[in-house]
Amino acid sequence: MPAVERVVQSTLVQALERYLRHISIERGLSSNTVAAYRRDLESYLDILATRGVTSSAGVSSADVAAFVQSMRGREDSPLAASSTARMLSSVRGFHRFLVDEGLAEVDPASEAKPPKLASRLPKAITVRQMAAVLAATDGDDEKSLRDKALLELLYATGARVSEAVDLNVDDVIGLEGHGASDVVRLFGKGGKQRIVPLGSFARAALDAYLTRVRPVLSSRGRSTPALFLGVRGQRMSRQSVWLVIKERVGQSNIGVEVSPHTFRHSFATHLLEGGADVRVVQELLGHSSVATTQIYTLVTADTLRDMYVTAHPRAR
């Protein structure tokens, strides 16, 4: 139950449901993203209710500012700047929608400024560290063969963990009549599709898994088209991928924390370090804007700078 009981028939509550349908159906956002928007905006409506606001016409810029302040000043668990910025982004999108749909005449959130975020570069591990993590899956048992195929695919394609667990067998495609798996079809945010090549290591790992392991795992559960299966024959979850990575990183003894997204960051960073064009990396990652991909060029620039300072006799 919300902290403050809202009037169910308030125009804001009705508008919220309309907005959530819009971002789900017309913009094609995932159910997880829509659920996140709902949480943010229900918190926003709770704050508006405490201020006596129940209609879109009654919202002022002061109400939006009060919401931001309440999120950052919570005594129990004040939000970090990044979380506050995300929630404000949800609010701004909601109010833009109200204006576009003629449900409000003015946008009270248009002038709201998000808190300044610290510049954080994506975390990537080195090529040697990645090789150690992948080598931790060496083995001839079912679990090792499955884990190797999974981790090799994550590193070879830069797939998000959600994209990897959503893969079906038919999304791994052989080209030019070859039996080997040459590319993978990934479905990113908003259902956007992209085709990403597979390197020789990922191809070999996937072919071994599909030939020797997946049929065995599949026989233990209900028929499913899922590519990666758990021990009971069900589609792997994001949590199960986290556990696989945690286990294999621990076995590798590289001494750093690694998440599923670390594979994506390392994929992009290592490509750029190897001379790949940023536009190509943008397509492979499925970024809508090249500006997002260009963050990784800062990582490689830092690496070059460190190497220069270490190696050049007049660098220091």
Image (spheres, grey):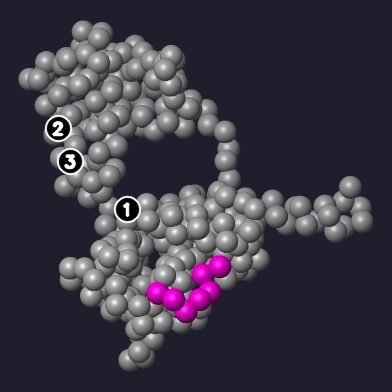
Q: Residue at x 42, y 31 (%)?
A: 83
- How many residues crowd mark 3 within 10 Å: few (<14), some (14–19), many (20+)? some
Label for residue 22?
A: 3
- Are circles 2 and 1 on residues that touch, CB within 8 Å? no
Of the residues shown, which amino acid type is indicated by label 3? His
**Residue tagged by mark 1?**
189
Query: Is residue 266 located in the magenta-colored stretch of the structure?
Result: no
- Asked which secondary structure carries label 3, the reply is helix
Q: Identify the element where label 2 is drawn.
A: helix
Crowdedness near tag 1: few (<14), some (14–19) or many (≥20) residues, C-alpha within 10 Å: some
Q: Are marks 2 and 3 in contact (CB under 8 Å)?
A: no
Q: Is residue 234 visible?
A: yes
Query: Which numbered tag is attached to residue 17?
Result: 2
Give the amino acid type for the residue marked by disc 2 in the picture. Answer: Glu
Rounded to the nearest angstrom, the CA distance separating label 2 from label 1 is 21 Å
Magenta stretch contains residue 139: yes
Where is residue 182 shown, x and y percent of the image? 40, 81
The residue depicted at 18 percent of the width and 71 percent of the height is: 223
For badge 1, the amino acid type reads Lys
Q: Nearer the viewer, residue 316 or 225?
A: 225
Frontmost of labels 2 and 3 is: 2
Of pointers 1 and 3, the one earlier in the residue sequence? 3
Secondary structure mostly taken by the magenta-highlighted segment of the chain: loop
Question: Which segment did they paint magenta?
Answer: 136-142
Cα separation, mark 2 vs mark 3, equals: 9 Å
